[in-house]
Amino acid sequence: MRAARVRLRPLRRVPIVLRLVLAVAAVMTLVLTVAAGFVYWRVEFALDRQLDGDLTAYGTDVTRALSDHGPVPRGPAASAYQVLTPGGRIVRASPDLRGERLLTAADLAAVGRGGTVRRDVGALLPADPAALRVRATGTRSGGRPLVVVAAMGRGHRDEALRELLAQLAIAAGLTLLASSLVGYRVARAALDPVERYRRSAADLAGHTAGARLPVPADRDDELTRLGHTLNGMLDRLQAAADRERRFLADASHELRTPLTLLRAELDVALHRPRTAAELTATLTAVDAEVQRLIDLSNALLDLEELGGKGRVAPVLVDLADLLRSTADRHRAAAARAHRAVTYDVTADPGTIVRIDPRWIRPALDNLVDNALRHAAGPVRITATARDGRLRLSVADRGDGFPPGFLPHAFDRFSRAAPGRTSPGSGLGLALVAAVATSHGGTAHAENGPEGAVVTLDIPCTAQGSF
């Protein structure tokens, strides 16, 4: 086994096209050899059968002439005969066969046992003008046993076989050459797209983002599907790179302002001695900026985590409990503003949905927090589970979103009028959209009859209660 691997190792360095051509050539050589051997065998069998028929008829004529003690009749062209004693002495023979007997001692013994001997004298290759086909049988003449040998020249038969061999060799060589050329062209045509993909991929490494492999749109074979798979991989790599660049850009852009404010506060505090009240005010401002940095960092990290694949782990959740806990977390803040947070579930009592509460809860918290900070009146959370869709909405009473802001409501760091979004980082709605997308749904922002309404529309499977 190890020796075979050592022998095959140099072949692995040969290009695939050449390996395919060699494989095609090897298979075609085997097929052509078998086919040529079969054709040669059939032609040789037919020629030998005709020759043996002529020999049998001629040997019968010689045997009859010996029995009648008459002259041996003239046989077919290139025919001759010998009459031997069982010991091998030539009794009678054609003029050109009187010098050397055609049978060996083993042949004479076989005839003596009552058999018929057939053998060839002379070779097919190289050409032998004295080549013969011999047939020997036993007979009796005048009461003594004799051996009758009928011989016939193989010139025409051997010439036909040699011509057949030459024709088969030429035909096999041309067929092998043609099949190798066809195999090369087929292999080249099959592997050219792979080579184009390789060159394109190498070129893409130094090009701008968004470049893709040239995949034909009118085909659906294995190589085309490979191209689509590679382009899909490039899309995922590009998306990952875009997320990374966006994360770095967002972080550098948004962290610069609070860090600058922190440095300014500390510089002012260190510029001259400060009273305890002034230091307290400075530390309060610094604490606010630090909290803003923490919130901003958490929001960016959450968005980055949601941008990856496989980050959502749906579990069975009771909708009523989910909305109740969300409202409870904000009741204190709403009470300080003399407002209320209510909820409503439109579904069968105890309906269970399969969602990831680890992300749905912060999304709802963001929406309720925005409503409490930027609107007036009560905040209402509604959930509707129907027809395989779950719709979670948060509505408030107020001026709503500015019309020009709605198309960009879920963009990162997108803010409406300063009167509505002066606090915050502008990442709350972006996080809501990311949560909806991670669940296979969408997020919508609109102005309702009384104020702003933000809805998460995600697929779900409603089930019975626990």
Image: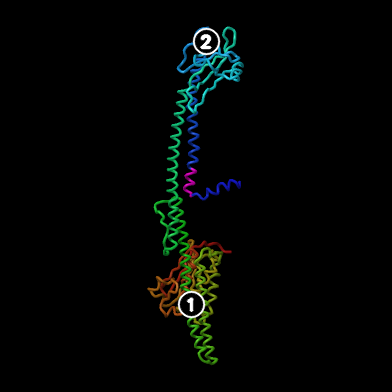
Mark 1 vs 2, N-terminal side: 2
For this rendering, which residue is in front, 363 or 212?
A: 212
Image quadrant holding the C terminus, namely bottom right
> Residue 360 at x, y = what percent?
52, 69
Report which quarter residue 116 is drawn in: top right
What's the amino acid at mark 1? Leu
Residue 107 magenta: no
Q: Mark 1 points at which residue?
A: 255
Specify whether residue 343 is in view. Answer: no
Mark 2, other Cα within 10 Å: few <14 / some 14–19 / many ≥20: some
Q: Any mark on residue 154, and which?
A: none
Q: Distance between the residues labelled 1 and 2?
A: 124 Å
Can you identify the residue that label 2 sits on?
64
On whether residue 17 falls in the magenta region, the answer is: yes
Graded by Cα atoms within 10 Å as few (under 14), some (14 to 19) or many (20 or more), the crowding at tag 1 reads some
Toward the front, the furthest residue is 99
The span picked out in magenta is 15-23
Question: Would residue 272 be found to the left or right of residue 207 on screen?
Answer: right
- Asked whether the beta carbons under mark 1 and mark 2 sit within 8 Å of each other, the answer is no
Residue 68 picture location, percent across and down: 52, 7
Q: Which residue is drawn at 59% across and 9% down?
A: 144
Residue drawn at (47%, 14%) of the image: 75
The residue at the point 52 percent across, 90 percent down is 278
Amino acid type, mark 2: Arg
- Where disc 2 sits, the SS reads helix
Q: In this view, does 43 lie above or below 453?
A: above
384 or 434: nearer the viewer: 434
Expressed as whole percent of the image width and height from the top left, the position of residue 157 reads 47, 24
Q: Can residue 123 be seen in this view?
A: yes
Q: Closer to the camera: disc 1 or disc 2?
A: 2
